[in-house]
Amino acid sequence: MKTLRVGFVWVAAVLFLMALILEVSIYVANTRTRQKSEALLTAIRQLRVGESTLSSTEKLLVEFGAVSSPTSPLPGLTRATEYQISVLNRLIPLQYRHRGLWRLGLGLKPTITSAQLEYRDGTLVSVTYRVDTPVFTHTGEGVQLVALTAIEEDRGTEPRSHMRPYYELLNGRNRGKFYGVQLGAVLSPNATPDQRNAAFDFDLSCISSLRGCQAFCEIMPSVWREAKRTYETHAPPMVQELLDNPSCPQN
């Protein structure tokens, strides 16, 4: 009996050590993911739509392993090329978001940061930076929260705001089932430095925390404040709930 107890103790100790090593590995990988995401954000902030070129941004594309794909041209426009960059912790399977294991915390929440750069005739015409992570609703249901900032060239003839917050309800391909909310800001190339700073005010520290990113206000505080003022009374219930997350400042 004593030998059996000793065996159980050893098994428990080995399992605990394995779990500890895995947790430390995940934390280190999450920290590296956050650092690379912050480096990508810094690089994206320097780009200028209508001015930056494919040759001037080649180093960025190579450094972050961008993948290119041609896009269908709009009527009257030449063919464009789009580059996609993704940063994530590959120790955490993306299936976790569907299986709900990220609910346990412990640094298991799968968060992806990405960038999309579109060029036409060698000139940058749009750039997008986004953070994609699962969050809870008040009912305990998991939904995807996408925090996004985009800079797009002015294609219309009507004047528009140089910075505007927006939201979008996200529906999947499977019978249009709702799965998340996208909240963010769209900038025009003529946005002021203050508007650019506000739109790209991402706080990515939650990526490497054990509980992960919990609310839109944590990830994009400046845009969150603007969106809350803009949609305080007329946003859909799900958007309103995400804006009014209890972990966010109430004033």
Image: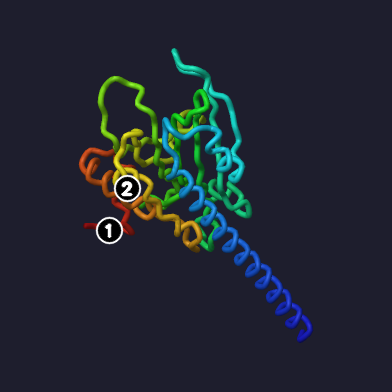
Q: Is residue 190 above or below residue 64?
A: above
Position of 187 with respect to 114 (left or right) is left
**Numbered-mark total:** 2
Q: Is residue 116 above or below residue 216?
A: above
Considering only order in the chain, which callout, 1 or 2, is on the residue closer to the N terminus?
2
Q: Which residue is mark 2?
A: 198
- Determine which quarter of the picture holds residue 191: top left
Q: Which residue is mark 1?
A: 249
- Numbered label attached to residue 225: none
Q: Residue at x 54, y 30 (%)?
A: 82
Front-most of residues 20 and 132: 132
At label 2, the amino acid type is Ala
Q: Residue at x 24, y 41 (%)?
A: 231
Locate residue 177, reporting x and y percent.
Answer: 45, 33
Position of 245 with respect to 41 (left or right) is left
Front-most of residues 43 and 186: 43
Instruction: Check disc 1 and report its element: helix, strand or loop.
Output: loop
Position of 151 with respect to 244 (left or right) is right
Locate residue 64, reporting x and y percent.
Answer: 58, 45
Pointers 2 and 1 in contact (CB under 8 A)? Answer: no
Mark 1 surroundings within 10 Å by alpha-carbon count, few (fewer than 14), some (14 through 19), many (20 or more): few
Front-most of residues 65 and 112: 65
- Determine which quarter of the picture holds residue 235: top left
At label 1, the amino acid type is Pro
Instruction: Check disc 2 and report its element: helix, strand or loop.
Output: helix
Front-most of residues 74 and 211: 74
Which of the two marks, 2 or 1, is nearer to us in this view?
Answer: 2
Q: Residue at x 43, y 43 (%)?
A: 146
